[in-house]
Amino acid sequence: MKYEASSIKEYISQVPEERQEILQKLSKLIKENLPEGFEEGINYNMIGYYVPHSKYPEGYHCNPKLPLPFINLASQKNSINLYHSGIYAKKELHDWFVSEYPKYSKRKLDMGKSCIRFKKLDDIPYELITELCTKMTVDEWISIYESVVKKK
């Protein structure tokens, strides 16, 4: 689902009530555990964590006016989704996450290239997401982005 919001608080207030507390918890967890340098705001009509133009003036190759995205959170029709660009761009990080997931959840991992879908809201692996957030610095993400994603 698409929400029109100019702040995280406004975004969360628009999602179904049973998801609001979960999105608040995930947002707080991500913000507190991402390495220094990422910023938080609304990006692509989702809750976003990104590299600001002050750190990476070139912005995102698909739309240079936007900052370089890293993690996004969204409330979709049937799930809460976490989009992690680092998982898409760095195979080792993807493989680590896939191998760790069963240690934190009884459910089968529902994942696309960068999208992790949580359909059962009572089984979100908060500890694993916390650890995932610490795995890549801003400088590492920029380097990976420039070597893998941007050259496509």
Image (cartoon, helix red, strand yellow):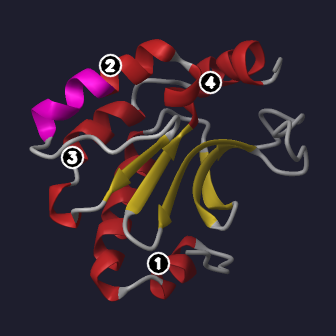
What residue appears at the point 59 percent right and 23 percent down from the top-left corner?
Answer: 89
Badge nearest the viewer, 1 or 2: 2
Query: Type of residue at label 2?
Result: Trp
What residue appears at the point 52 percent right and 34 percent down from the top-left corner?
Answer: 113
**Residue extent of the magenta highlight:** 98-104
Q: Which residue is mark 3?
A: 125
Say whether disc 4 or disc 2 marks the residue closer to the N-terminus. 2
Q: Which residue is mark 2?
A: 96
Q: Residues within 10 Å of mark 1 (few under 14, many from 20)?
A: many
Separation of residues labelled 2 and 3 (CA atoms): 14 Å
Q: Which residue is mark 4?
A: 141
144 vs 53, left or right, is left
Separation of residues labelled 1 and 4 (CA atoms): 27 Å
Query: Type of residue at label 1?
Result: Ile
Q: Position of residue 103 (x, y in %)?
A: 11, 31
Badge nearest the viewer, 4 or 3: 3
